[in-house]
Image (tube, rainbow, N blue to C red):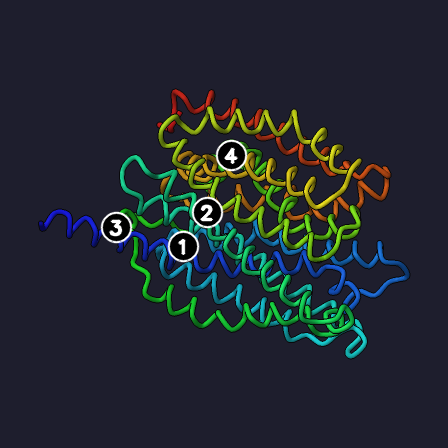
Amino acid sequence: MSLPSRSASEGKSKASMVFRVTSGNFLEQFDFFLFGFYATHIAAAFFPASNEFASLMMTFAVFGAGFLMRPLGAVILGAYIDDVGRRKGLIVTLGIMASGTLLIVLVPGYASIGLLAPALVLIGRLLQGFSAGAELGGVSVYLAEMATPGHKGFYASWQSASQQVAIVVAAALGFALNEWLSPADISQWGWRVPFAVGCMIIPVIFLLRRNLQETEEFAAREHRPTMKQVMATLLANAGVVLFGMLMVAMTTTAFYMITVYAPTFGKTVLQLSTGDALLVTLLVAVSNFIWLPIGGTLSDRFGRKPLLLAMSLMTLITAYPALTYLAQSPSFGHMLEVLLWFSFLYGMYNGAMIPALTEIMPVEVRVAGFSLAYSLATALFGGFTPAISTWMIHETGDKAAPAYWLMVAALCAFVATWLLYRRLANRVPVTV
């Protein structure tokens, strides 16, 4: 009787650790999604311009600017986490992220304080970006290090799965507000309500993280690298970081396209209702939540490399035909079909990619290396996906043009995966 009881107790402990460590991921993605969905209202409040396109482009540029801070946060905060531990480091990243969120919520509009308004919003986004630079890496490494043997992919997949919960909650809040408030009320003050809800859960997340246990693998480590040693190790492994960045390119581009940009695409390009665009995004997040752990589990069973190559190749082949089909006959049903297909590709790919990235990085700088690769990809690809998609449609007149950007990311991922595993086969033990 003692063995089943112990097993059940260990299972509950693992589940509790997953919940505690991914809570910060929830807050990060909750706020990022809201910024993307309410982009038109944020543009009107903080970035008024002569036309809607210019105003929206400035908003998405500020949204993307936060991602430019990620590489800096990845190195500085990533090295800090590799030094002081996963638990302490993740509490610090949460504090910085919360500061940025609070700043954005509390800033008055342009009409009240002029240019100070967009400047403060930009500072808030930069703080969020700096924090997020190490948040994803810290959480992913924590999950990989606490995983039971042979199940690293399954455990690591919950980093991304927690983000999908945030999108479901944020989309549900937006849908409810759209039903309860008039468009004028949402434009004037209603869009701030979901951000305020996010601020109210910050103290709860702090309590959850404060009681987080350190991973046994890190606690047993005797050597803790200095910042100088971290930089030297990252430089010596620049090729691995570069390949890792290109692998992440597809994940981050696909994710921001089907979640953060999708509501704006549905409303402004396809001319769907706000409710339809939100409902599609909510269902896509549920789909992501299902496919991510499946992808992680399959990569545990069959290896990371086959799944990564197959999903990136399928994305490269189907992205433009799928978006062309949607652009030619826009409707709620067709948008749902196309984004659910992209959700499958993203979820299966990312479920394998996250554990793969933790495995290829040198153990002594695992958080810094993971975070730098992820942050560079987000800064160069994913973070600017809404802005690039908006610009491509405006310049070409092709509503399916964002597919080209996704195809570039998929090609990068396919080539990088092939070359990286070929290069590391005889040098570093990885799952193939």
Q: Give the foreground label among 2 and 3.
A: 3
Q: Which residue is mark 4?
A: 349
Q: Which residue is mark 3?
A: 11
Taking depth in this image into account, of 210 and 342 the one nearest to the observer is 342
> Mark 2 packing: few (<14 Cα in 10 Å), some, or many (20+)?
many
Farthest residue to the bottom: give it: 112
Q: Position of residue 340 (x, y in %)?
A: 60, 40
Q: Nearer the viewer, mark 1 or mark 4?
A: 4
Label ID, residue 81 = 1
Picture quadrant where residue 409 is located: top right
Helix, strand or loop under label 1: helix
Q: Hey, what amino acid is under mark 1? A: Ile
Q: Using the image as rendered, state which of residue 159 and residue 329 is in the foreground.
A: 329
Residue 428 can be seen in this image: no
Q: Give the position of the C terminus as an image quadrant.
A: top left
Q: Nearer the viewer, residue 140 or 116?
A: 140
Mark nearer the N terminus (1 vs 4) = 1
Q: Earlier in the sequence, mark 2 or mark 3?
A: 3
Q: Is residue 333 left or right of residue 295?
A: right
Residue 197: quarter of image: bottom right
Q: CA distance from mark 3 to mark 1?
A: 26 Å
- What crowding class fits label 4: few (fewer than 14 Cα within 10 Å), some (14-19), or many (20 or more)? many
